[in-house]
Image: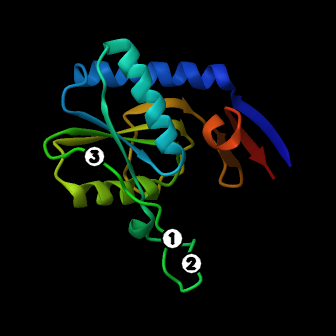
Amino acid sequence: MEQTVLLDQQAIRRALTRIAHEILERNKGTENLVLVGIKTRGVYLANRLSERIEQIEGEKVNKGEVDITLYRDDLSKKTENEEPMLRGTDIPVDITNKTVVLVDDVLYTGRTVRAAMDAVMDLGRPSQIQLAVLIDRGHRELPIRPDFVGKNVPTSREEIVSVDLTEVDEKDQVIIQKN
């Protein structure tokens, strides 16, 4: 299987720094801002964005994480008794009337983001929901568009985009694999 590195550690760092600046610019600072990472890698990216924003603004930004398992329309991973596996949602602040920025690693069909929006809406009514992704690979099946993108990568449906992060995979890189 042929694979190409799309982003290395430095490129990921630069992309996240740029996204942090764009989030601050669009939202005029950190007031009423909540970063919500979509499990699993979106959580680590949200944490990194939170650190960047704090370095830039000198203010902490609220953050949380959302598990979209129950909201998927294509549940695949199930436990032995056919129940969906849950990893937990944790948003420690009230999101009502806040700007929620959903953070994920790869935007593909849009179904994960739709499920995350449903999960967030069950917790409160944000004034708006924005979307930040490291990679937008196209092939949307739903009318979802990211507000902040690290890199647009046109792909074929046969290609696989993998995001490796130090917190999970012991190194930072984004690779595309062709079969």
In contact (CB < 8 Å): disc 3 and disc 2: no
In contact (CB < 8 Å): disc 1 and disc 2: yes
Residue shown at 50%/55% (left/top)?
Answer: 109
Q: Which quadrant of the view contains residue 11? A: top right
Position of residue 54 relative to residue 136, above or below, is: above
Identify the colour scheme used: rainbow
Q: Nearer the viewer, residue 57 or 132?
A: 57
Residue shown at 57%/42% (left/top)?
Answer: 137
Q: Amino acid at mark 1?
A: Met
The residue to which callout 3 is attached is 92
In contact (CB < 8 Å): disc 1 and disc 3: no
The residue to which callout 2 is attached is 79
x%, y% of residue 97? 13, 42
Q: Which quadrant of the view contains residue 22? A: top left
Q: Which callout, 3 or 2, points to the residue nearer the camera? A: 3
Q: Earlier in the sequence, mark 3 or mark 2?
A: 2
Q: Earlier in the sequence, mark 1 or mark 3?
A: 1
Q: Amino acid at mark 2?
A: Thr
Marker disc for residue 85: 1
Give the secondary structure at mark 3. Answer: loop
x%, y% of residue 84? 49, 75
x%, y% of residue 92? 28, 46
